[in-house]
Image (cartoon, coloured by chain):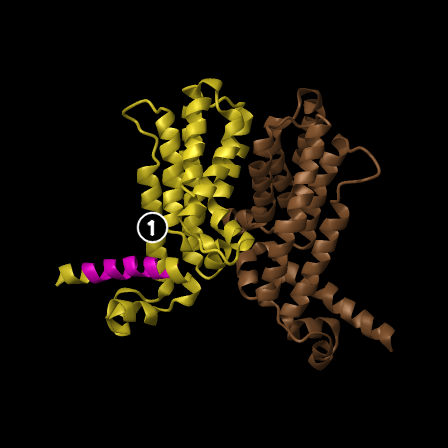
Chain colours: A brown, B yellow
Amino acid sequence: MPKTRIKTYDRIVQDSLKLFNEHGERNITTNHIAAHLGISPGNLYYHFRNKEEIVHQIFLSYRRFISERLAVPSDRQMDVADLVNYLETAFEAMWQFRFMFYDLPGLMARNPQLQADYHQFVNGELQTILEGHFREFIRLGLLKMDLEDIEPVSVNIWLVVKFWFAFEQTARPKAPINEASSHRGVRQVLALLKPYVQDDFLPAFRQLVARHHTAD
Amino acid sequence: MPKTRIKTYDRIVQDSLKLFNEHGERNITTNHIAAHLGISPGNLYYHFRNKEEIVHQIFLSYRRFISERLAVPSDRQMDVADLVNYLETAFEAMWQFRFMFYDLPGLMARNPQLQADYHQFVNGELQTILEGHFREFIRLGLLKMDLEDIEPVSVNIWLVVKFWFAFEQTARPKAPINEASSHRGVRQVLALLKPYVQDDFLPAFRQLVARHHTAD
């Protein structure tokens, strides 16, 4: 019955993501996951040796999401809509996989395999994607920036995206992390980019910022 | 013997800070602290009910450090040296109290009193200090910035400062956090400010950036 096996495997990953996002990964055990799925702990252990393996599979989904959705398009020119779409997709990824970013250093410390793969992804593929976009936006005249500034500005953007939810959690401990948090995060990244936006594109840029204000 | 009592109390706080910074707060118990000081666990418990109380005292030292060292001077005009000194002091605070920033969300979750006080400090006093400096730097012509940008730029600076060590830890899991990490952090904050530096001050600003390059 390979079909059923694949289905249970995927359901474990999907439901774990949901439970981790809602309650925090630390508060969810494999027993909670099995109970939520209505399967026995033994059945869960048939698919995954431990919770860390489930978290690792979720990380791989996150990596696929980023790589597929944020790739620089090879078949057409990018435009201002791509800049918008790019940021919104980055925050959509953060939102869908938000439990990973509540406490990333803690999560890594408990999961060496995740740490190794995450490290490789961020310093390899993701860096290439981020800098590739910047160079395209500069080449197309959407952004104006000295070449020496690309790297530090990319790093700041990545840092704000990555730690936005953790920042909100520590700044507003009683408020839940919700989609308004994502909108505030997009605005913070837009604030980082604003000094580099070419005058021609400032009106479109301001509209984008406004869209994330009304959505609060 | 009030003198001895105060001394032991202070030594517990100081040595705990050292141990937390070197090994991470999670890996240090009250027994480790007592052994390091050469006192009995009972003697430690005479001063502190638990580790959370020690962490809370360390936080109060951090708060005093920030409030005293980063206050806007009332007796004289600020100049470009103050901008430099301001950033370096912020990172010095991060470095001296670095264990708090390795995993701030985790630390807060385990210490509700700390969470409440930290929250109050960040949203009250610290916000006032940060925005006060910005307004002074703008008024003095060191920075040029629309008033509407002060708040989002302050938030980004605070976020980069606060999560810099956590970012380095996840990006370079095998490298120790050291003073070179602080220098990279200062450079990232300078990159945030660069678009707003007035032309007259760009040479001094570039010298500052260079100083944090050679220090790596």
The quarter of the picture where residue A205 lies is top right
Q: Residue at x 29, y 60 (%)?
A: B15
Q: Residue at x 42, y 61 (%)?
A: B24
User: Furthest-left residue in view?
Assistant: B1
User: Furthest-bottom residue in view?
Assistant: A42
Q: Nearer the viewer, residue B40 or A129?
A: A129
Using the image, determine if residue B147 lies above or below residue A178: above
Asked if residue A24 shows in the view, the reply is: no
Using the image, determine if residue A138 lies above or below residue A72: above
Using the image, determine if residue B190 lies above or below residue A179: above
Q: Nearer the viewer, residue A81 or B109?
A: A81
The quarter of the picture where residue B213 lies is top left
In the rendered image, the quadrant that contains the C terminus of chain B is top left
Number of marks: 1
Span colored in magenta: B6-20
Q: Residue at x 79, y 40 (%)?
A: A73
The local secondary structure at tag 1 comes to helix
Q: Position of residue B8 (x, y in %)?
A: 21, 62
User: Furthest-front residue in view?
Assistant: B214
Q: Nearer the viewer, residue B40 or A79?
A: A79
In the rendered image, the quadrant that contains the N terminus of chain B is bottom left
Q: Position of residue B124 (x, y in %)?
A: 42, 40
Q: Position of residue A170 (x, y in %)?
A: 50, 50
Q: What type is the residue that disc 1 sits on?
A: Leu
Subunit of label 1: B
- Residue, disc 1: B60
Whether residue B153 appears in magenta in the rendering, the answer is no
In the image, is A90 to the left or to the right of A101?
A: right
